[in-house]
Structures are given as structure tokens and as C-alpha cells.
Amino acid sequence: MLKQINGGVCAAKGFMANGIHCGIRKNKIKRDLALIYTKAPATAAAVYTQNLVKGAPLTVTKNNIADGKAQAVICNSGNANTCNANGIEIAEKTCALLADALKIDAKDVVVASTGVIGQPLDITPIANGIPALVAGLGGHSDLACEGIMTTDTQPKEIAFEFSVGGKTCRIGGIAKGSGMIHPNMATMLVFVTTDCAISAEMLQKALSADVKNSFNMISIDGDTSTNDMLSILANGEAGNTEIVGEGADYDAFCAALNAVTTDLCRKIAKDGEGATKLLECKVTGAKDEQTAKTVAKSVICSSLFKAAMFGADANWGRVLCAIGYAGADVDVMKVGVAFRSVKGMVSVCENGAGIPFSEEVAKEILLESEIEILITLGDGDAKATAWGCDLTYDYVKINGDYRT
């Protein structure tokens, strides 16, 4: 049974974290360097952006954890270390400096960066900050979470307790992501830790399968980042028999992992740049899962629909429009649409056509901060969920001067 607990990435036994301001960001009250560490060696897995332009840290991390092992994660914010001639050198130097401070192998470090693309990254503030970063290690998931934030307005962390083979295990995660989010693997940056014993092969299998229904189903603005990465470390300190194949234990682990990723998906979508509302599009009655996913993602990505949600306008025609150009094999004459929030539910479309409804009631429902878009396709039993947010004036304001 899953139980939500406190602790974020420090909830799992043996994991410590910290976050400091080292000087990459001009604002001295904003943390810009984060660390997660386990004394016990951990199995490791990751998924990365499919953007052809990739941040140097992704290349270094991919090489480092090719053996399925890691002990630490270091991440800076304020600079993406992307499209820099010496980006690989800086990322590798960061790993080496941290490894020296922790007395571990530099190849056992996951390194990540987030922030402005194309600006040189000076190693000096990182080098100067690492001693304090290491010295302050403890149960500080919240500080690490702050250290990876850029335009985020809210920290994003979660943890759960679950059982594997009669042993109590814990899993937790932190994430950053607010804009430039239209993933083709994961989101901006997500770090997950667990004390469950699981082989690197099964960890990678679980992670790769999970993102298809979690982070790959978010969209804030249609832009896939260059630095997207989701990594997970499992140190085995829960003492369960190592998961090396499919079965009940693997299923329990996957369920716990999905609880973490789904929660972080919702937090990321709700904190989209300039957003005032979390949009959750639930598609049912599809002929297959891919059709359901295609429809859900198309609706969530529609700028016209997102703008309508900002204005609390029950413009269901924009939902039908997005379904129509999604590229999915859908019989539009069977489509039904409804909107739901804590204020209730209103059906607005049946069999591909509008039905009478109260605009006043619909407005009240859509003024809430979390909105469900319920779509029925009437073609089968498959379903899917996608997450996004409304499109507001502030999104343009934030991105109009993001670099300057």
C-alpha cells in the first residue's frame, strides 16, 4: 500500500541533500547549486531530452552512468551549460571537484544544469561552492529543490512509502520545470531517489516505461528543452531482495515510481509560466492507447483552448477543433466533452454537437484553479491523461525578457 510521507529525495534511507547560493545567479537570495548524495553505491538510470541540441551535462551524465551506477547528483541553475565550446570540460570538471570532496569516483556523479542557453559557465563559483555544499549535507531536500529552480514559483517535491517483499521501501523526488516544457521523454529536470534494491536494468526498464504515461504527457508551451533529464538512484538500503525481473515486487516498485512522477507532473503543469490553472485532460473510450494519448496531448497543447481556460470560457468548440487536427483516427460524431472542477461538472458536447448548458454554471466551474477536461470518444476501452495549464498574459511577459 502506498503512503505519502515527508522528506522528498531524503525520505529514502541513506540519502542526503543540500542547496546553496554559490554565485552563478546574481540574486544572492536564490540558491543555484544543489546536491543529492548516498554513501552507499546506488544503481542508476536516466532518460534524456530528444532535442538534437543537448546540454553538455547530459552527455557527461550519460557516459558516467553507462555502467548503471552513481552516488551523487549535482545540479546548477542560472546557466544551462548548453551550446558552449567548453561545456563538456565544465561538466566533467564539476564531477571531478565534487568527487574529490566526497571521496568518490567522478564517474559516479550525475551532473545537470538549467537556465539560459548559450552563455559561458564559469567553473569558479561552482568550485568555490562545493565545500559548503558538501559540508551542509543532511535532510535538506527542500534546499536542493530550491537550488534547481529557475522561473518556478513553487518547489516541487514528494515522497511515498511502499512495501516490497515484506520490506518497507521509500521513494521520493524533486523537480523543476515551469516553461520550455513539451517533453519527448521527461520534463526539465527531475531527480528521484529510493532505498529499494533493484538492478540497473530493471530500474531503467521501469523508468523508460513510466515516462510514456507521465512526463511525456505534459505540455506547458510546446517547446522541448535542451536540458531535459530524469534520473533515479536506488541504493538498496531498504534491505529487500533485489528486484532483477518482472513480478509482484517489480509491479509494486513501478506503482510507487508512478505515484511520484504523476504528482510531480501535476505540480509542474500547475506551475507553468504565468499559469493560473492546472488543466488535466482525461480521454476515455478510445480504440487504443495511442489514440487516447494523441487526443489528450492535442487538446492540452492548443493555444486557443488554453487561452479560453484562462478566461473561464467554456468554448468546447476549441476542444473539438484540437481533436480534429490531432491526427488520430476518431469518429467525431461520437465525441463527448465535459468540464469538471471542485464546483461541479457541466457537459457541453455530445455526439460531436453542442448541447444546452448554463454558461453561468460553466463559468463558475472554470474559475477554479484545477480543471478537468473529460473527453469520451466512444470507440473502445483505452484511456489516457495529459497535463497542462492555461495561457496568460504573464507567459509572454516572463519570456519576453527571460535572458536580459
Image: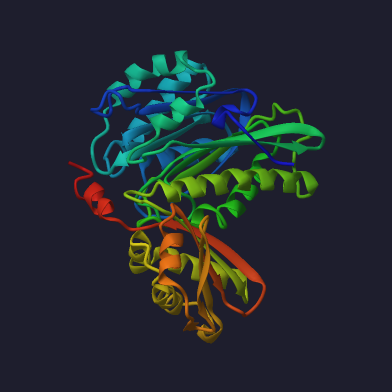
Q: Which residue lies furthest to the right in this view?
A: 166
Q: In which quarter of the image is the N terminus?
A: top right
146 relative to 116 in the view: left or right: right
Q: Which of 89 and 50 is in front in this view?
A: 50
Q: Nearer the viewer, residue 163 or 193?
A: 163
Q: Tell me residue 12's x, y (percent).
A: 63, 29
The residue under the point 46% across, 13% down is 135
User: Can see residue 47?
Assistant: no
**The quadrant where residue 293 appears:** bottom right
- Residue 357, position in %: x, y? 47, 75
How far across and down, in percent of the image, does residue 101 sit? 46, 16
Q: Count all numbered tags in the image, as a single digit.
A: 0
- Considering the image in quadrants, where does the C terminus appear? top left
Does 241 sit left or right of 276 as displayed? right
In the visual, does 41 lie left or right of 19?
A: right
Query: Can I make out residue 150 in this image?
Result: yes
Extreme residue toward the bottom, this view: 333
Nearest the viewer among 267 and 169 is 267
- Residue at the far left: name it: 404
Query: In this rendering, is residue 351 above or below 376?
Result: below
Q: How is this picture coloured?
A: rainbow
- Residue 152's x, y, as percent? 36, 40
| Residue at x 73%, y 45% (from the top left corner) | 252
Q: In this view, does 120 lie above or below 47?
A: above
Q: Residue at position x 37%, y 58% from top?
A: 390
